[in-house]
Amino acid sequence: MAGGKPGGAGKLAAGVGAVELPAAGAGVPKWRTTRLQVDWASAPPPPAAVDLKGLASRLMAPPRDESLPGLDALVVVEGFNDCLALHRAVRAPVYVMGGGGALADAMSPELRYLWQLASAGVLPRQLVVFTDPDWQGRTYRTLLDDELRVAAGKAAVAAAKAAAKVGAGTGKGAAGAAAAKGPVVGGSVGADAAVLRPGARRLLKPAAAAGQGSEAKQETALPAAAPAAAASAPGGEVVVRHAFLRVELATSEVDSGRHEAGNVGVEHATPDVIRSCLRRARPGFGPGRSEFTAEGLQADGLIGVWNDKAKVAGPGLRRGRFCRALGIDEVGSGKALANLLNRYFTRDDYAAALEACQLPQGAAHQEVEAQA
């Protein structure tokens, strides 16, 4: 769940400091985390619109608990409480978007600069977007996906121009530019394919077993990752993965000092659930994909006929269950749901969620009557 806003005025280089964060919940002591140490001297210069001090205050270092598995990626979350939950599950650096201010116009330059830092190797070249399974989390995820694509596209254009300039007069300019752009994949230049390129490398590294020296303790279904030194994507490519969390696994069951029971957010997920979500994180798809259509959703009973209440009730309930099975909030329109599916999900994901949302005969009318 988001918490806090982007803060800090000025353009100061980031220092290293400790940050006291709220208690993680009933019976859980306060956690203390530190800012990520960044080699700003090696970083590309920030755009004038980027508040470097504010950005640095929301880049958090991994916890020092060696019993936790490591993650070779920078995880993007909405708020500091989400960061705490993540650090109870894995050792990974975290970028905190900053809550309600994350959709401000000022965030777009920062998100694009984040991509530049990753591309330059100043930050991990793998990013994992892990937002809440609600409307706001979906909005943040879309913003991140769009802005990182814009940054990748600009980098590809710059690389193509540089290659063309180097090859000018040698007859290799066009070939160099094409090589810099990369192959055309699914109607989009290789910039999108590079940013969202599926990687075979495992993200999670096993935790060190107590009393076993350097030997690794293999957690169930937790495969070993490549060494940290080899974890970066080759050639400056940035791989963006998306992790999804089912709403029932992210819902608070009790009132706390911060939220009432029923609040939804990454901060409420258990460490095991968070690790499971991160293991399944994978890149999305480039623009222009048309695997899913509103007509197909209607044929599968996820969209009803707007002027026939008898045909709306069942699809509405199925669609709610379908979205929850995917780890997203309920999407109201068929067009919006198809766009979301095309952006992030495979046909296998669709089939599994469709099976999970099937209602027994007559159950739709019973649920409608119960809600009336």
Image: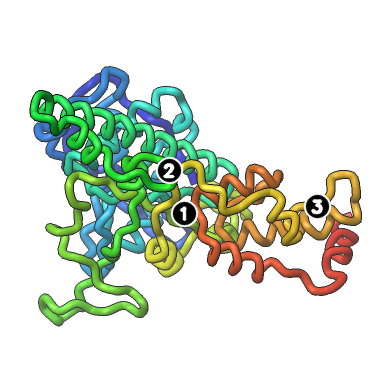
User: In which quadrant of the rendered view does residue 361 lie?
Assistant: bottom right
Task: Kindly identify the residue that appears in the image at 87 percent across and 61 percent down.
Answer: 370
Nearer to us of marks 1 and 3 is: 3
> Mark 2 or 1 closer to N-term?
2
Q: Residues within 10 Å of mark 2 (few under 14, many from 20)?
A: many
Quick check: 264 left or right of 216?
right
Which residue was labeled with disc 3?
Answer: 304
Which residue was labeled with disc 1?
Answer: 267
Residue nearest the observer in this picture, 33 or 186: 186
Which residue was labeled with disc 2?
Answer: 79
Q: CA distance from mark 2 to mark 1?
A: 9 Å
The secondary structure type at the circle numbered 3 is loop
Nearer to us of marks 2 and 3 is: 3
Task: Kindly identify the residue that appears in the image at 69 percent across and 49 percent down.
Answer: 294
Task: Kindly identify the residue that appears in the image at 78 percent across and 57 percent down.
Answer: 315
- Expressed as whole percent of the image width and height from the top left, the position of residue 256 reads 54, 52
Q: CA distance from mark 2 to mark 3?
A: 36 Å
Q: Residues within 10 Å of mark 1 (few under 14, many from 20)?
A: many
- Expressed as whole percent of the image width and height from the top left, the position of residue 204 reads 29, 65
- Residue 60 at least partly seen: yes
Say which quadrant the C terminus sits in: bottom right
The secondary structure type at the circle numbered 1 is helix
- Expressed as whole percent of the image width and height from the top left, the position of residue 53 reads 25, 28
> Mark 2 or 3 closer to N-term?
2
Q: Which mark is residue 88?
A: none
The amino acid on which the numbered mark 1 sits, given as a three-letter code, is Glu
Task: Kindly identify the residue that appears in the image at 27 percent across and 18 percent down.
Answer: 48
User: In which quadrant of the rendered view does residue 92 lie?
Assistant: bottom left
The amino acid on which the numbered mark 2 sits, given as a three-letter code, is Gly
> Mark 1 or 3 closer to N-term?
1
Disc 2 and disc 1 in contact, CB within 8 angstroms: yes
